[in-house]
Amino acid sequence: MARLLLSLILLCFAPPLWAEGILPRAQGALFGAAKPLVQVHGGDAAQGGSASLFSGTTGTSLFAPYPERAKRGRLAVPLGGSQADRILSVIAKAEAGRSGYDAVNYGARIKPPKAPSQMTIGDIYKWIRQTPGQPHAIGRYQFIPKTLRRLVNSQGLSTQTRFSPRVQDQLARQLLQEAGLSEFKRGALGRKAFMRNLSKIWAGLPLSNGKSYYQGYAGNKATMSWSDFDRSMQLIFPGRT
């Protein structure tokens, strides 16, 4: 028994067999050191580091930083830009959705020959003439033909002017002024009265009852709830009633 115990003790403290050259050291996936699926602290496979599961995705949609916004539930209002720019973002959400500056009224059976932001104002007039009997609201702010012509003439724009994002914003800012933006900012017009004026211009914006000012007319309806519209304006103009 004593000899058996001594043999066991010697076996426990003996060097591993591969160290003595008796067995080859284990290699490969089965016995090799485990590699992390995701490398947290950098390191490129080509530089000797372990390859990350998501390497090379920086700046893509998978991990792109979300635009800086003020969030309240489903509501998202851009924090940057002027107050007018931020109002226009709210309007665009109600009117154009993801299509933005290239939005065309969904009821238009014959679409423009190319993206609206790449067309000249003359191109848009031509498209309107050649496709009668359908809605022609176009762009980020869904300008209807009559309003578009009035704004273009008011601002002295040429038919060769491209209907670019800058031009669309420029035209829409005139509508903000017509809705009373300057009066509102200096306190001569209340926030809800200003919001009502905006709803009279853009059918996608709701009145306080949640309906469009043009509800049912040519299929119009509000695309944003009153609570979202109201909270958006509160974020842009805190403390204003």
Image: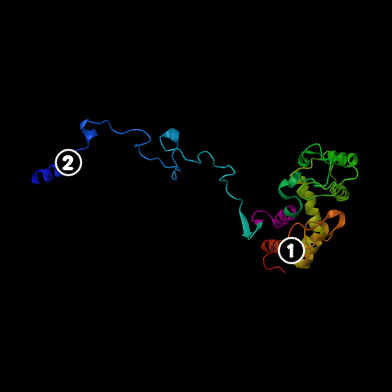
Camera sees residue 159: no
The foreground one among 140 and 209 is 209
Q: Which residue is mark 2?
A: 11
Horizontally, residue 70 falls left or right of residue 23, namely: right
- Residue 81 magenta-highlighted: yes
Residue type at numbered disc 2: Leu
SS label for mark 1: helix
- Residue 91 magenta-highlighted: yes
Camera sees residue 95: yes
**What is the x, y in percent for residue 108?**
83, 44
Mark 2: few/some/many CA within 10 Å (<14, 14-19, 20+):
few
Q: Quadrant of residue 208?
A: bottom right
Residue sitting at the far left: 2
Horizontally, residue 32 falls left or right of residue 214, namely: left
**What is the x, y in percent for residue 16?**
22, 37
The relative height of residue 104 versus residue 87 in the rendered view (above or below) is above
Q: Quadrant of residue 6?
A: top left
Q: Which residue is mark 1?
A: 226
- Magenta segment range? 77-92
Residue sitting at the far front: 1
Scheme of image coloration: rainbow
- Residues under labels 1 and 2: Cα distance? 80 Å
**What is the x, y in percent for residue 177?**
80, 58
Residue type at numbered disc 1: Trp
